[in-house]
């Protein structure tokens, strides 16, 4: 069978790691995984750059890295750094940091995450990985068939703002009363709308990251004026 990046497979936990490391490029969903087993998986994949794990009450999703994901992820960081620079905001990025709660039995590794309003909580501090505070914004790049709904994970962990990008469309969500509702503009970066940012992401695909970043910075300067 010819595998594609959008195929999802359910495997038992004993064969998953070997299967994943054979270059198949598939998203894997495992069931009946204990918290201890989840932490073991985190340790197993800690040295494998780009692999992402999400855990929700016994269900474990493991996603392999792809160049496409990495490019989109880097673009988000470029544009958010530009925004914070021009609007004179503190910025700390932590990429795919693992956020988890044993009590809630939930864990997730976003494609990107940003600390802006709460940047001072982590700047210059040594914080144990299990106690790391959740970010102001988490980014999920969703260009494959999702096998695990991550909204309940992020809401349980109380991440204030979530961005979902499917390779074409970008949607901003704000946590309100334990549920996410769609918003047009970021609450963390009020001058930035999802439509604006999606256009710069598209521009990066068409004309490259340098051109898109320069265009974004010029546009942001106009917004600030």
Image (tube, grey):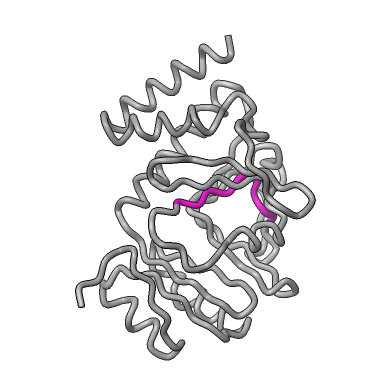
Q: Which contiguous range is marked in magenta? A: 133-141
Q: Residue furthest top?
A: 225
Q: Residue furthest bottom?
A: 14
| Residue 25 drawn above or below residue 132 | below
- Residue 119 location (% of width, % of height): 67, 41
Q: Nearer the viewer, residue 193 or 18?
A: 193
Q: Quadrant of residue 223?
A: top right
- Residue 194 location (% of width, % of height): 53, 33
Q: Residue furthest left?
A: 2
Q: Nearer the viewer, residue 181 or 111?
A: 181
Q: Nearer the viewer, residue 133 or 127?
A: 133
- Residue 103 location (% of width, % of height): 75, 74
- Residue 131 location (% of width, % of height): 70, 63
Query: Is 139 one of the magenta-colored residues?
Result: yes
Q: Is residue 123 visible?
A: no
Q: Nearer the viewer, residue 44 or 164?
A: 164
Quadrant (top left/top right/bottom left/bottom right) for the N terminus: bottom left
């Amino acid at each position: 069978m010819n595998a594609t990046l959008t195929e999802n497979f359910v495997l038992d936990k004993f064969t998953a790691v070997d299967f994943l490391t054979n270059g198949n490029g598939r998203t894997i969903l495992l069931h009946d995984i204990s918290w201890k087993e989840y932490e073991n998986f985190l340790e197993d994949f800690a040295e494998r750059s780009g692999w992402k794990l999400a855990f929700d009450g016994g269900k474990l999703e493991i996603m392999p890295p792809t160049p496409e994901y990495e490019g989109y992820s880097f673009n988000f960081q470029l544009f958010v750094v530009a925004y914070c620079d021009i609007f004179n905001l503190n910025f700390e990025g932590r990429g795919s940091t693992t956020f988890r709660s044993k009590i809630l039995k939930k864990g997730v590794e976003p494609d990107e995450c940003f600390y802006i309003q709460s940047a001072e909580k982590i700047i210059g501090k040594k914080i144990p990985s299990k106690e790391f505070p959740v970010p102001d914004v988490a980014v999920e790049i969703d260009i494959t068939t999702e096998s695990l709904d991550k909204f309940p994970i992020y809401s349980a962990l109380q991440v204030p703002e979530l961005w979902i990008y499917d390779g074409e469309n970008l949607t901003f969500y704000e946590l309100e009363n334990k549920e996410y509702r769609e918003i047009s503009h970021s609450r963390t970066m009020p001058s930035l709308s999802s439509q604006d940012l999606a256009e710069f992401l598209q521009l990066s695909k068409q004309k490259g990251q340098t051109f898109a970043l320069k265009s974004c910075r010029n546009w942001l300067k106009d917004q600030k004026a």
